[in-house]
Image: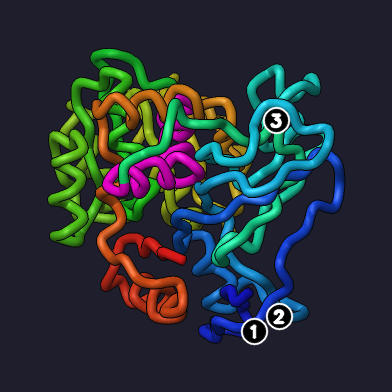
Amino acid sequence: MKGAVLHGPRDVRYEDRAEPKIVRPTDAIIRMSATCVCGSDLWPYRGFNPAAEPTPMGHEYCGIVEEVGREVTSVKPGQFVIGSFFASDNSCPICKAGYQSSCQHAEFVGGAQAPLLRVPLADGTLVATPGAPSTDMIPSLLATSDVFGTGWFAADAANVKPGSTVVVVGDGAVGLLGILSAKQMGAERIIAMSRHGNRQKLAREFGATDIVPERGEEGVSRIKEMTKGIGADSVLECVGTQQSMMQAIHCARKGGYVSYVGVPHGVKLNGEDLFYAHVHLHGGPAPVRRYLPKMIDLVWTGRINPGKVFDLTLPLEQVGEGYLAMDERRAIKTLLRP
């Protein structure tokens, strides 16, 4: 088969790769219905995480089960399934606490930008939909695999409650779906920190009540002004830079909650500053598996449409253009159809 392989900075090729096979009796093979480019894929694409060798890309996936190992019992061939970017057994003490992305037996699920994918620990990782989805529903179901799950975790980790004031730092797909998640959790005021018109429009559609284009100290000052000097109850950090992290911490009220789901690059926290900020910090790789049943139900019943974050759809063989469009901010998120 052919799939996406990263050879170096800004060098993604659609080339021959070995077809995945059942390796362990707990594996499943999925024929992809759709996959996509993640914002976190742009870090290695831009050279921030240099690869020592050509690397198969992609970790967001949904599709139909083709084959299962002899120990797999929860899914079967022919079912439409969605899974997280971290495989988990969903039964260890860490999983039972709700942090499947840090499962004691976790395995990263990579190489999803291809027609076929091997998913380890299939029983604990994959969730089947109630039936075969319509073509129109597939983008929203794909979003639950990572980007919506990460946005949901951002809102949950920031303790978003009914009636709360929420600030979202970052207007990429995760930030936008953090807005949608906060709206679902009952936030009364949702302030999107964004300076791009198309993203601002989608932010409002997902539930943002206010838009703040300023960044850094200016952004913090604007948030404080809008909240009568107090700050927000909950702040979602969805970027992963030093500026975005400090902006998020300083936008929160004393005793407020800050979640961080952007993959950190160069982030360093000063102990004394953090001490006097007096905020709760909670984040990390999103435990998407915890939320999959809830998110799938919201999509399946037509209550939400997170697939709107995909504003560019390409055939898989044009994966290089999909990366470039996101890198140049011509697209929020690229959906790829095998």
User: Amino acid under label 2?
Assistant: Pro
Viewer-nearest residue: 75 or 181: 75
Residue contact at pointers 1 and 2, CB within 8 angstroms? yes
The dominant secondary structure in magenta is helix
- Residue position marked by numbered label 2 in the rendering: 54
- Residue position marked by numbered label 1 in the rendering: 7
Label 3 sits on a secondary structure element that is: helix
Residue drawn at x 72%, y 35% is 88
Mark with earlier residue (1, 2) = 1
- The numbered dot on residue 112 is none
- The numbered dot on residue 124 is 3
Question: What x and y, as percent, mark residue 239?
Answer: 44, 53
Dot 1 crowding, Cα within 10 Å, few <14, some 14–19, many 20+: some
What is the spatial separation of the Cα atoms under label 1 and label 2, in whole angstroms?
5 Å
Mark with earlier residue (3, 2) = 2
Residue 261 in view in this figure: yes
Q: Of circles 3 and 2, which is in front?
A: 3
User: Amino acid under label 3?
Assistant: Gly
Question: What x and y, as percent, mark residue 68?
Answer: 73, 42
Question: What x and y, as percent, mark residue 49?
Answer: 65, 71
Residue 158 in view in this figure: no
Viewer-nearest residue: 280 or 101: 101
Look at the picture and state if 148 lies above or below 114: above
Residue contact at pointers 3 and 2, CB within 8 angstroms? no
